[in-house]
Amino acid sequence: MSKTAISVRNCFFCGRHVTTGQGTMLVKNDGSIQWTCSNKCKKNLRKLKRDPRKFKWTTKYVKGGIKVKK
């Protein structure tokens, strides 16, 4: 029996796990790779250009808002 290694990556927007064969990969011009787990994350990241720290449904959410230095 052959053992298959399941590669688990994290979604660039929400932080959930993206298993092998799932999600969408975007390779930017600088060589960095962004994985998204769903169409919802893909649209929020690329089309709407939203910050994942502002949405409660992401694991990157920051309670109390984002502190901005002046």
Image (tube, rainbow, N blue to C red):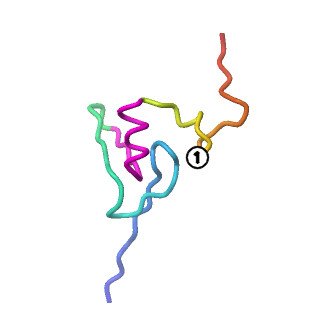
Q: How far across and how far down the image is residue 13, in percent?
A: 47, 42
Q: What segment carries the magenta color? A: 32-48
Residue at 57%, 45% (x, y): give it: 58
Q: How far across and how far down the image is residue 32, in percent?
A: 35, 38
Residue at 38%, 43% (x, y): give it: 42
Q: Is residue 23 above or below residue 40?
A: below
**Residue 21 in which image quadrant:** bottom left
Does the magenta-highlighted stretch encompass residue 6? no
Residue at 40%, 31% (x, y): give it: 48
In the depicted view, which residue is nearer to us: 19 or 57? 57
Residue lying farthest bottom?
1
Q: How far across and how far down the image is residue 53, in percent?
A: 58, 35
Q: Quadrant of the N terminus?
A: bottom left
Residue at 53%, 37% (x, y): give it: 52
Q: How far across and how far down the image is residue 37, in percent?
A: 41, 53
Query: Mark 1: few, some, or many residues within 10 Å (few <14, many ≥20)?
Result: few
In the depicted view, which residue is nearer to us: 28 or 48? 48
Q: Regarding mark 1 in the picture, which secondary structure is present there? A: loop
What residue is shown with label 1? 57
Does the magenta-highlighted stretch encompass residue 40? yes
Q: Name the amino acid type tagged 1.
A: Trp
Q: Is residue 4 above or below residue 53?
A: below
